[in-house]
Image (cartoon, helix red, strand yellow):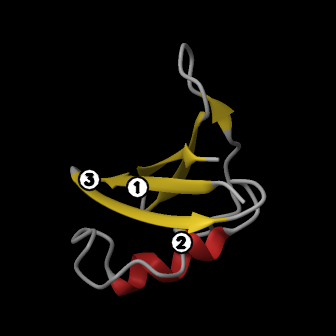
């Protein structure tokens, strides 16, 4: 199974996570449910509760191979998630 690296960006902070899955879309636990406290300082416990990782649509990043992006609104701000297939 491929290894995917997920990079989350929220209000100027970044967090990276990895997981081996058959595809990058369906395994939210790899990047959404295991965000360590303090990894994204602006993502408060209250905002984490309103976080719906299933919202938003994955799109290919133009001019890149095996890189996808989705945007999720949290507290009126964009949380951007990149999925990169880093190993097949």
In the image, what residue occupies the spot 27% across and 68% down? 40
Q: Which of 71 and 31 lies nearest the eye of the viewer?
A: 31
Residue 85 percent location from the top left of the image: 58, 44
Of badges 3 and 1, the one in the foreground is 1
Pointer 2 local density, CA inside 10 Å: few below 14, some 14–19, many at least 20? some
Residue 41 lies left or right of residue 47; in this view the side is left
Of badges 2 and 3, the one in the foreground is 2
Q: Which residue is mark 1?
A: 8
Q: Give whichever of discs 1 and 2 has the lower sequence position.
A: 1
Q: Which of 19 and 14 lies nearest the eye of the viewer?
A: 19
- Are the residues tagged 1 and 2 within 8 Å (C-beta)? no
The tag on residue 76 is none
Q: Which residue is mark 3?
A: 11
How far apart marks 2 and 3 lie (CA) works out to: 16 Å
How far apart marks 1 and 2 lie (CA) works out to: 9 Å
In the image, what residue occupies the spot 58% across and 57% down? 3
Q: For the residue labelled by badge 2, is the local secondary structure a helix, a strand or a loop?
A: loop
In the image, what residue occupies the spot 62% across and 68% down? 52
Pointer 3 local density, CA inside 10 Å: few below 14, some 14–19, many at least 20? few
Pointer 1 local density, CA inside 10 Å: few below 14, some 14–19, many at least 20? many
Res 57 quadrant in image: top right
- Residue placed farthest to the top in the image? 63
Q: For the residue labelled by badge 1, is the local secondary structure a helix, a strand or a loop?
A: strand
Residue 33 percent location from the top left of the image: 54, 80
Q: For the residue labelled by badge 3, is the local secondary structure a helix, a strand or a loop?
A: loop
Residue 19 percent location from the top left of the image: 57, 67
Q: Quadrant of the N terminus?
A: bottom right
Q: Which of 86 and 50 lies nearest the eye of the viewer?
A: 86
Residue 79 lies left or right of residue 58; in this view the side is left
The tag on residue 32 is 2
């Amino acid at each position: 199974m491929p290894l995917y690296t997920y990079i989350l960006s929220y209000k100027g902070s970044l967090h990276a996570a990895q997981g081996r899955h058959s595809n990058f879309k369906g395994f939210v636990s790899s990047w959404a449910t295991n965000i360590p406290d303090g990894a994204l300082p602006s993502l408060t416990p209250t905002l984490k509760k309103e976080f719906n990782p299933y919202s938003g649509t994955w799109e290919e990043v133009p001019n890149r191979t095996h890189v996808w992006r989705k945007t999720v609104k949290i507290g009126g701000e964009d949380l951007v998630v990149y999925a990169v297939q880093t190993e097949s």
